[in-house]
Each structure stands twice: as structure tokens, then as C-alpha cells.
Image: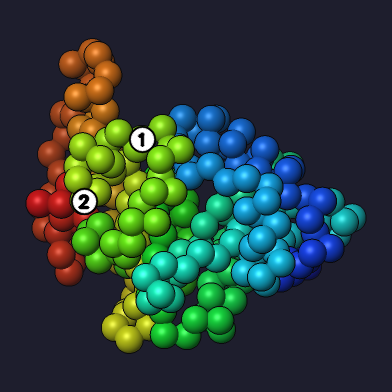
């Protein structure tokens, strides 16, 4: 059965305040399970996003909470981030994350039609979803430089890495949709499919490279295979290592 027939994805409002704590708890649990950090959010912050009409919430056909995502704006509305994507463990791997991302992307385009929409992710699955919406991998220099945005990373376990790189790179991969200058979703999807094996390998290399100064790791890490230096558009290495 298609995802849209199994789940109802709504623009959240005050009637959904009761799910704020559940959402925050699941965000924290998911981050711990992945061993990667996310900017921690409070129930009050989630409620505010619901009140403003800047979030979407998903329910199963039985009315059980299934997922959530919200919108943040930076640099006076010039940049928009679709943040806090979370799917309940009971409903993962069924296409719901993709459906939520699509819904929040459409809401972002409606509320902020001229804004650049960006995201930071440590996962290949989210990169794939973003690519299908028209996002492209970019260097951190193409993201908002609003100090308030980067301050939100302080609760992330990788914040020390981010600051050691002078906010020019971190464990996350940056992706951007620019309404004034972008490839069509079919093109960015094809780009991802053609290079996903390289991207997956680079995610592992990036983790090794950035954690090396902070952890006493065995030198026998997986760094034996050579990575092609150039691909279509900029080199993928630029997006990962800011070369």
C-alpha cells in the first residue's frame, strides 16, 4: 500500500501540543542510537513551531503518532531549514520519512518562496530523499552564517569538531535548494544515484578523518580504497573536506 494511504500528514497546530514531549524524547533516543548528534530541542520549542504553523506531524491510519518535522528561518528569512525530522521506530523503513520531507518542503516553499532551503545530515538515506526534492550537496560556506543557527549546534556531540573546523565543515553533509538557481529534481536524483557509492565511502572516510584528533582510535581503520577525485559539477571531496 502506498505511504500516503497509510498515513495522514498534517500541518501541526495547538491541538497537537500533547505530542511535543514524545517528539523530543524520540529525537534524543534516535540520536543516541545513531551515535551522532543533533541540536537538542525542548517541548516548548516544538510547541511554538506547531503554534506558528511551521511544522508537520504524521499519524497512522489508527491515529497513532508516527513522525514530525519543522521549519526554521535564518538570516531574516533568506535561508530556511527543514529540521528535526523524526519517524517513530514502529513506522520506519516504510517511506514515511520521504513523505514527511516532501510535505515540509512544500510548506517551506509556500511560506518562504524566495528562501534557500538547506539541510545538514549524517545519513545517506536523508541525502537520497533531499536529492529527490532537488537539493544539491554544497560546502558550508553556502549555508547561512547566522550565529544563531550555529549556536543551535552546541548541544550536538560533534560541536567540538565543528568549531575546530571554524564552522567550515563537520560530520554532517550540507545540502541546499536554491529557488533561483537549481537543477531539476530528476537531475539531482540522477546525480545521487550515479555517485551514491562514492558518497557512502566518503561518509565513512569523513567520520574517520574528523574523529581522529579527538579519539584514540586504532590506526587500522577502513582507509584502503582510493576515492575518485572528480565527479560531475564540483568534486565531491570539496563538499566533504572543504578542499
Q: Residue at x 23, y 33 (%)?
A: 210
Residue 154 in picture, x, y percent from top left: 40, 40
Left or right: where does residue 238 sit relative to residue 174?
left
Asked if residue 94 is positioned above or below residue 215 in the image, the reply reads: below
Left or right: where does residue 102 sit relative to residue 123?
right
The earlier-in-sequence mark between 1 and 2 is: 1
* Residue 1 appears in view: no
Asked if residue 227 is positioned above or below residue 157 in the image, the reply reads: below
Residue 29 vs residue 221, the one in the foreground: 29
Q: How many marks?
A: 2
Residue 133 vs residue 39, the one in the foreground: 39
Could you tell me which quadrant the N terminus lies in? Answer: bottom right
Left or right: where does residue 10 sit relative to residue 241?
right
Image mark for residue 158: 1
Residue 58 in picture, x, y percent from top left: 73, 60
Badge 2: how crowded within 10 Å, few (<14), some, or many (20+)? some
Q: State how far apart marks 1 and 2 are (Cα).
A: 13 Å
Q: Residue at x 71, y 70 (%)?
A: 11
For numbered disc 1, what is the local secondary structure? loop
Q: Residue at x 33, y 56 (%)?
A: 147
According to the picture, the residue beneath numbered tag 2 turns out to be 168
Q: How did the renderer colour the structure?
A: rainbow
Image mark for residue 84: none
For numbered disc 2, what is the local secondary structure? loop
* Residue 32 appears in view: yes
Asked if residue 17 is positioned above or below residue 226 in the image, the reply reads: below
Amino acid at each position: 500500500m502506498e505511504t500516503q494511504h497509510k498515513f495522514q500528514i498534517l500541518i501541526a497546530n495547538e491541538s497537537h501540543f500533547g505530542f511535543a514531549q514524545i517528539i523530543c524524547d524520540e529525537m534524543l533516543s534516535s540520536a543516541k542510537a545513531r551515535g551522532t548528534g543533533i541540536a537538542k530541542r525542548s517541548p516548548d520549542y516544538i510547541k511554538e513551531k506547531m503554534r506558528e504553523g511551521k511544522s508537520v506531524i504524521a499519524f497512522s491510519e489508527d491515529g497513532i503518532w508516527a513522525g514530525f518535522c519543522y521549519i526554521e528561518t535564518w538570516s531574516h528569512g533568506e535561508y530556511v531549514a527543514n529540521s528535526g525530522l523524526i519517524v517513530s521506530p514502529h513506522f520506519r523503513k516504510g517511506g514515511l520519512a520521504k513523505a514527511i520531507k516532501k510535505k515540509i518542503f512544500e510548506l517551506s516553499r509556500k511560506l518562504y518562496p524566495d528562501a534557500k532551503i538547506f539541510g545538514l545530515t549524517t545519513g545517506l538515506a536523508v541525502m537520497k530523499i533531499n536529492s529527490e526534492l532537488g537539493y544539491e550537496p554544497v560546502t558550508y560556506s553556502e549555508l547561512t552564517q547566522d550565529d544563531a543557527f550555529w549556536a543551535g549546534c552546541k548541544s550536538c556531540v560533534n560541536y567540538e569538531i565543528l568549531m575546530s573546523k571554524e564552522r567550515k565543515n563537520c560530520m554532517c553533509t550540507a545540502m541546499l535548494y536554491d529557488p533561483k538557481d537549481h537543477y531539476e529534481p530528476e537531475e539531482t536524483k540522477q546525480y545521487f544515484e550515479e555517485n551514491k557509492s562514492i558518497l557512502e565511502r566518503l561518509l565513512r572516510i569523513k567520520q574517520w578523518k574528523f574523529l581522529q584528533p579527538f579519539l584514540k582510535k586504532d590506526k587500522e581503520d577502513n582507509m584502503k580504497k582510493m576515492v575518485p577525485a572528480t565527479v560531475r559539477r564540483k568534486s565531491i571531496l570539496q563538499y566533504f573536506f572543504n578542499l
